Image (cartoon, rainbow, N blue to C red):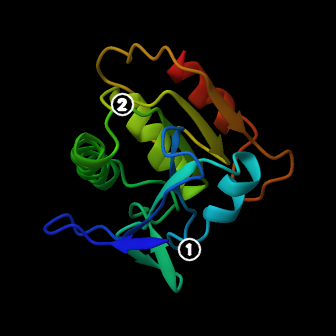
Amino acid sequence: MTAHRPRGSGLEFLFKEGADGTRDIWIALHGSGRDETDMVPLVREISPEASILSIRGTVSCDGGYAFFHRDQANRPDPADLRERSRQLEAFLGEYACNHLAGRNLVLCGFSNGAVMGASLLLRGNCRFSSALLFRPMLPFRLTTAHPNLQIPVLLVDAKNDGRRKPQNAVSLANELK
C-alpha cells in the first residue's frame, strides 16, 4: 500500500491498486476511533481485486480518528460535518481528476464513515457509481432540493445496535430516494 498526504489537503490516506488497474476504486471511510487501515480487509472481502482509496478522518477520537465532531448528545455537529464534507468532496474531486480518471468510484463507509458518506451523497456533488453504508444515520435534514441520486445505495443496519436508533437507516433511505 502507498501512503500519501497531498500538500495542503490535511488528509492522510492509503491507496492500493487492485489486480486490474481498470476496475472500480473503492473509497473507504472508517468508523470512529479508527484509521485508514481499518476498512481495507472489509473491502478485500467484498471485492478482492478492486483498488482501494482508504481515507483517514481528520478529527482525533478515542486513540484514532473520525471524520467530524459530535455534539454533547453524541449527534453529528451539522456545521462541522458540512464543512468537513465539503473538504473531503474537494479532495476526492481533485484526486479523482488527477489519478482515477475514467474509473467508477464505489463509496464504502462504516459508522462515522457511513455518516460522512451519507453527507457526501446528500450534497449531490460526488460522482460515485454506487455506495455501501454500514451503520449509517441521517447526518442532517436537507433544507434545499434533494440530490438527484441515480445510483444503487445499500444501507446496512443492525437490529440491536446500542448507538443507533432502529429507524436511522430508514430515515436516511427516505432522504436519499
What x and y, as percent, mark residue 139?
A: 46, 42
Name the residue nearer the viewer: 94 or 165.
Answer: 94
Q: Classify the position of the C terminus by image quarter.
A: top right
What x and y, as percent, mark residue 59?
A: 37, 72
Kind of residue indicated by mark 2:
Gly
Q: Is residue 172 left or right of residue 2?
A: right
Residue extending furthest toward the front:
20
Q: Is residue 47 left or right of residue 64?
A: right
Picture layout, residue 128 above or below residue 177: below
Q: How many marks?
A: 2
Kind of residue indicated by mark 1:
Arg
Density class for disc 2 (Cα within 10 Å; few <14, some 14-19, many ≥20) is few
Q: Earlier in the sequence, mark 2 or mark 1?
A: 1
Q: Quadrant of residue 101?
A: top left
**Residue drawn 69% across the image and 50% down it:** 164
**Residue drawn 22% across the image and 46% down it:** 98
Picture layout, residue 150 above or below residue 54: above
Q: Quadrant of residue 110?
A: bottom right
What x and y, as percent, mark residue 78?
A: 35, 48
Name the residue nearer the viewer: 97 or 88.
Answer: 97
Residue highlighted by disc 1 = 34
Picture layout, residue 71 above or below residue 165: below
Q: Give me the disc on residue 62.
A: none
Give the secondary structure at mark 1: loop
What x and y, as percent, mark residue 87?
A: 24, 52
Q: Which mark is nearer the camera, 2 or 1?
A: 2
Q: Give me the disc on residue 102.
A: 2
Give the secondary structure at mark 2: loop
Q: Is residue 166 left or right of residue 135?
A: right
Residue extending furthest toward the bottom:
63
The answer for how far apart the CA atoms under marks 2 and 1 are is: 30 Å
